[in-house]
Image: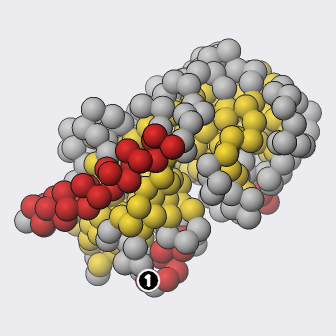
């Protein structure tokens, strides 16, 4: 049987530690907000680090634009326009110069970042059209630059040729309202979760489902894969939602991590932190306004850090940055870079972009 783990008796000590750090962090955040210009209009639904060497970050907003920023220097590089509906996800998986955005207007947009210093607002190089409802998620891989995969509320998964912008094939499954997708490293497989509470693995060579995991009690909101491709992570909706670690070979859950008080919006494997500690480390975000860092301890996961930005806000996405930093986005039009200490247990400072 898989193990269940919750905050338990540690919640009071974690909360107390969080309150001690919150006072200094909030002071830093107020200072940063006064000094920075808000480049984002509307709620930020998705962020993506597309080039860590040049500190380039994408942010997709309800304002129908994608903003490209230099997160290190707090500088807006350009705005990508084109979508007629809210941007649901942004992606920079095919190198530093090609970026994508999915939208509620049923389309996917591709931009080429030729010169971000130009004052001109880049228009889409290509528009991918095939879905009948909002495109909720897209997935790509550096190893498969000529392919892109998308999922939609029309219950379909579609494989695209990025050169011609044409759909290669599409598969629809009843009640499969796709919530998130993740390309499994350099394989020819896609991980996909859905409102039908199922986690699936698709083979893009045939676009057939090759694995289906046991159904959960709650809707699955996000998914992630470990670097070795042997384990998956999912987040759920609910008042006490679980973050589930799955064994790919057995298709069974290994453990459930609980602590968030509302829907889990994002879960990510922290590669640098895991390598340094020689123990799997993940970060999660939630509609409860918090992000949490978890590290594997024997067969369970220990909560190293829990920080709430605001109970009235929702953290929509989180990404890992170099030098023990993470970046989060929120419905309150805020993108924040968090500097963590060496142990990933404390926040040293926070900077709003």
Q: Quadrant of residue 17?
A: bottom left
Can you see residue 334? yes
Query: In the image, residue 279 lies at what x, y percent?
Result: 42, 80
Residue drawn where x is 20% and y is 62% of the image: 20
Q: Nearer the viewer, residue 169 or 52?
A: 52
- Left or right of 304? Residue 227 is right
Q: Looking at the rendering, in which quadrant would you find the N terminus? A: bottom left
Q: Quadrant of residue 331?
A: top left
Percent coordinates x, y for residue 287 in the rendering: 33, 38
Q: Which residue is mark 1?
A: 277
Q: Position of residue 335 (x, y in %)?
A: 50, 43
Q: Is residue 148 left or right of residue 348?
A: right
**Residue 46 image point, x, y percent:** 55, 39
Q: From the viewer's perspective, is residue 186 above or below residue 309?
A: below
Colour mapping used in the image? secondary structure
Residue 79 shown left or right of residue 31 in the figure:
right
* Number of numbered tags placed on the structure image: 1
For label 1, the SS is: helix
Is residue 188 visible from the viewing direction of this image? no
In this rendered view, identify the residue nearer to me: 103 or 244: 103
User: Which residue sits at x=82%, y=35%?
Assistant: 111
Q: Is residue 2 above or below residue 205?
A: below
For the point 69% across and 41% down, which residue is it? 76
Query: Foreground: 211 or 93?
Result: 93
At 32% across and 51% down in the image, what residue appears? 27
Q: Is 309 on the left or on the right of 38, as rendered?
A: left
């Amino acid at each position: 049987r898989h193990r269940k783990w919750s905050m338990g008796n540690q919640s009071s000590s974690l909360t107390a530690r969080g309150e001690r750090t919150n006072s200094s962090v909030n002071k830093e955040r107020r200072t940063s907000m006064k000094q920075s210009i808000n480049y984002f209009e509307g709620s930020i639904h998705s962020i993506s680090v597309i080039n860590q060497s040049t500190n380039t970050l994408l942010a997709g907003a309800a304002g129908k634009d994608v903003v490209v920023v230099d997160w290190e220097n707090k500088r807006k590089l350009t705005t990508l326009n084109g979508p007629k509906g809210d941007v649901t996800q942004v992606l920079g998986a095919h190198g530093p110069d090609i970026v994508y955005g999915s939208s509620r207007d049923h389309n996917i947009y591709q931009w080429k970042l030729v010169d971000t210093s130009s004052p001109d607002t880049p228009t889409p190089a290509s528009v991918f059209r095939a879905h009948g409802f909002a495109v909720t998620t897209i997935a790509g891989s550096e190893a498969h630059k000529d392919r892109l995969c998308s999922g939609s509320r029309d219950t379909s998964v579609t494989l695209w040729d990025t050169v011609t912008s044409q759909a290669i094939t599409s598969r629809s499954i009843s009640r499969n309202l796709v919530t998130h997708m993740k390309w499994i490293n350099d394989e020819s497989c896609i991980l996909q979760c859905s409102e039908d509470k199922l986690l699936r693995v698709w083979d893009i060579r045939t676009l057939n489902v090759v694995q289906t995991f046991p159904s959960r009690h709650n809707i699955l909101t996000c998914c992630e894969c470990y670097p070795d491709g042997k384990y998956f992570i999912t987040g759920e909706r609910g008042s006490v939602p679980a973050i589930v670690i799955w064994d790919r070979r057995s298709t069974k859950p290994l453990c459930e991590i609980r602590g968030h008080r509302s829907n889990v919006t994002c879960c990510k494997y922290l590669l640098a932190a895991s390598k340094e500690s020689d123990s799997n480390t993940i970060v999660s975000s939630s509609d409860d306004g918090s992000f949490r860092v978890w590290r594997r301890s024997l067969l369970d996961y220990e909560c190293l850090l829990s920080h709430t930005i605001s109970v009235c806000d929702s953290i929509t996405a989180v990404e890992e940055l170099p030098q023990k930093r993470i970046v989060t986005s929120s419905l309150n039009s805020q993108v924040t870079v968090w500097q963590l200490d060496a142990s990933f247990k404390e926040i040293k400072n926070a900077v709003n972009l």
